[in-house]
Image: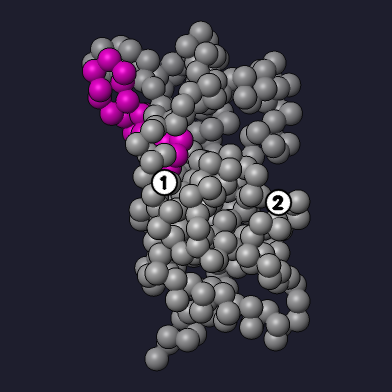
Amino acid sequence: MICWCRWQQKGGSFMREKNMLQILKASSYTVVLRGAGLMAESGYPLLRDGKESYEIEEKYGYSFEEIFNSAFYSARKELFFRFYKEFILKATEVPPGKGFYALKTLQDHGLIDSIITRRIAGLEDRAGCRNVLNMKGTIYENVCPSCGRKYPVEYMKEAKGVPLCEKCMTAIRPQVCLFGEMLNNALVTRAAEEVGKADTLLVLGANLTTPLCSQFLQYYTGPNLILVTEKEHYSDQRADIIIRGRCDEFLADMVSEYEKQNKD
């Protein structure tokens, strides 16, 4: 295992960036597992783990896990959507941070092939990334369960109370996986195949015991499991390379180093 510190001397940092770029260039297929850390760096609230979790419970009398649950959605739609608009949809006002745009640029340069995430904010898609597997769906897909009519997120934001289908007056269902629901099997299979054919796996802003990593690391057999995170965790030892620092700064450094090497 190799561990590089984000805050080492400039010369050492340069060597790290250069070596990391060489790994990405040499990789025949690179897959990103993107966790919550990159979202937090962009200013997105972490409703399950951040300070907002206390605000939710104080205001609604339920935890995030209790409200954002399939049973709660079925039984108390009005309260569900009040919470959904205030805490989930309001976060869409925060644009993707520089880390997401750096991911897109690295894809444009052919250094990243696919991205897998369980987060529903659709930040990679908004930044223009391609081949993104949103394991839990995104808030940008909303469908009437009765007639199949699709609605944009703006319609969900502007609706008063429970958003209803204009055609059949049924409650519109955000196409996201709530607590208590199973992930789409076909999507899980596709993600497992992506990880299985990767020779470089880049884990951003997540420890290796999170549901995202626990589910898919078992399919990875390549030589370069690279972890980028600020926080130490006992599972870090499973990584081949650890970059200790902010994900967005690491990705921006990769873009800068690539463009410097290829400016001519």
Q: Are marks 2 and 1 in contact (CB under 8 Å)?
A: no
- The residue nearer to you, when weighing 14 against 105, is 14
Relative to 233, residue 59 above or below: above
- Hey, what amino acid is under mark 1? Ala
- Hey, what amino acid is under mark 2? Ser
Residue 19 lies in the magenta-colored region: no
Q: Residue at x 47, y 86 (%)?
A: 261
| Residue 235: mark | 2
Give the x, y percent position of residue 110.
38, 70
Tell me, yes or no, if residue 86 can be seen here: yes
Give the x, y percent position of residue 204.
58, 56
Q: Which residues are magenta?
A: 133-156
Alpha-carbon span between mark 2 and mark 1: 22 Å
**Label 1: which secondary element:** helix
Tell me, yes or no, if residue 42 can be seen here: no
Quarter of the picture containing the N terminus is bottom right
Give the x, y percent position of residue 119.
52, 41
Relative to 247, residue 88 above or below: above
| Residue 159: mark | none
The quadrant holding residue 56 is top right
Residue beneath disc 1: 191
Relative to 135, residue 29 above or below: below
